[in-house]
């Protein structure tokens, strides 16, 4: 058993923190939450704050890189998901940046050396980290595959359906998503322009499949949304 904890200023050992946990999320239980407004930087890897592993406890976080002054979405994380696990295996590209995608995004963080120490002492945690990295890689591969196989409109349909299933609150046969991503953010994830997202959302609202305003989005007919996202054989 490893027993360590940290004070707020320098995260030096001060109080017991037990690392014999059954899963990685439990490592964050006693860590304070930090809340970020939409668009606020959580970390970028030229800062000391990059030397942490993070748990999203509410909201969404995107990881982006900069290439020739253009932003490229690397991945996005939602409630219950751990990010920056790849840092435990070595240095990362200097252009990575994590940003809150919705208001009131909250995270917890653990210093990287202590996270490494925890997973070294528990092979179940190590396996979970590998699963986490594998899931992130699969999300990226799936996004690339959809950009090859699906039209721009279909990629928006697919994201809305998957986002409703993962983050929406089911009310009867409908799914309520709150807060709502901007059209630009949906476009970044789906790999389409903001105007395409606006056109698709308006068409879906006209057809009664979704309803939305600035505060929430309701998927009224998930099956119809899924059907529109399928590749024709």
Image (spheres, rainbow, N blue to C red):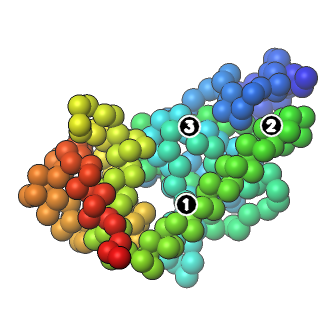
Front-most of 168 and 98? 168
Q: At numbered mark 2, what does the secondary structure look like: helix, strand or loop?
A: helix
Q: Residue furthest top?
A: 15
Query: Which residue is at a point 69% across and 67% down the rendered structure image?
Result: 94
Q: Are marks 3 and 2 in contact (CB under 8 Å)?
A: no
Give the x, y percent position of residue 175. Answer: 28, 40
Q: State the separation of the CA atoms marked 3 and 2.
A: 18 Å
User: Is 210 situated above or below 195?
Assistant: above
Q: Residue 114 is drawn in which quadrant? A: top right
Reading the image, the residue beneath label 2 is 124
Mark found first going from the N terminus, 1 or 2: 2
Give the x, y percent position of residue 59. Answer: 45, 40
Reading the image, the residue beneath label 3 is 80
User: Is 106 situated above or below 193?
Assistant: above
Give the x, y percent position of residue 208. Answer: 11, 52
Reading the image, the residue beneath label 1 is 139
Mark found first going from the N terminus, 1 or 3: 3
Q: Residue 179 is drawn in which quadrant? A: top left
Front-most of 70 and 180? 180
Is 102 positioned to the left or the right of 72 in the image? Answer: left
Quadrant (top left, top right, bottom left, bottom right) of the N terminus: top right
Q: Residues within 10 Å of mark 1 (few under 14, many from 20)?
A: some
Q: Residues within 10 Å of mark 2 (few under 14, many from 20)?
A: some
Q: At numbered mark 1, what does the secondary structure look like: helix, strand or loop?
A: helix
Q: Are marks 1 and 2 in contact (CB under 8 Å)?
A: no
Quadrant (top left, top right, bottom left, bottom right) of the C terminus: bottom left
Q: State the separation of the CA atoms marked 1 and 3.
A: 16 Å
Query: Which residue is at a point 50% across and 73% down the rendered structure image?
Result: 145
Is 32 positioned to the left or the right of 122 in the image? Answer: left
């Amino acid at each position: 058993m490893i027993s360590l904890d940290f004070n707020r200023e320098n995260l030096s050992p001060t109080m017991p923190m037990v690392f014999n946990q059954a899963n990685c999320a439990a490592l964050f239980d006693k860590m304070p939450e930090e809340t970020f407004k939409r668009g606020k930087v959580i970390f970028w890897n030229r800062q000391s704050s990059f030397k942490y592993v993070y748990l999203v406890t509410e909201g969404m976080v995107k990881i982006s890189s900069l290439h020739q002054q253009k932003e490229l979405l690397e991945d996005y994380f939602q409630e219950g998901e751990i990010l920056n696990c790849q840092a435990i295996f070595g240095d990362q590209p200097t252009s990575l940046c994590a940003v809150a995608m919705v208001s009131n995004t909250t995270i917890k963080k653990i210093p990287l050396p202590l996270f490494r120490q925890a997973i070294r002492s528990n092979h179940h945690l190590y396996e979970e980290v590998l699963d986490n990295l594998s899931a992130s890689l699969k999300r990226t591969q799936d996004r690339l595959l959809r950009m090859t196989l699906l039209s721009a409109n279909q990629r928006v349909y697919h994201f809305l359906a998957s986002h409703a299933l993962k983050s929406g609150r089911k009310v009867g046969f409908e799914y309520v998503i709150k807060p709502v991503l901007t059209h630009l953010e949906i476009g970044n994830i789906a790999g389409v322009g903001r105007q395409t997202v606006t056109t698709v959302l308006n068409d879906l609202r006209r057809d009664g499949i979704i309803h939305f305003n600035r505060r929430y989005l309701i998927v009224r007919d998930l099956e119809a949304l899924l059907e529109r996202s399928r590749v024709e054989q």
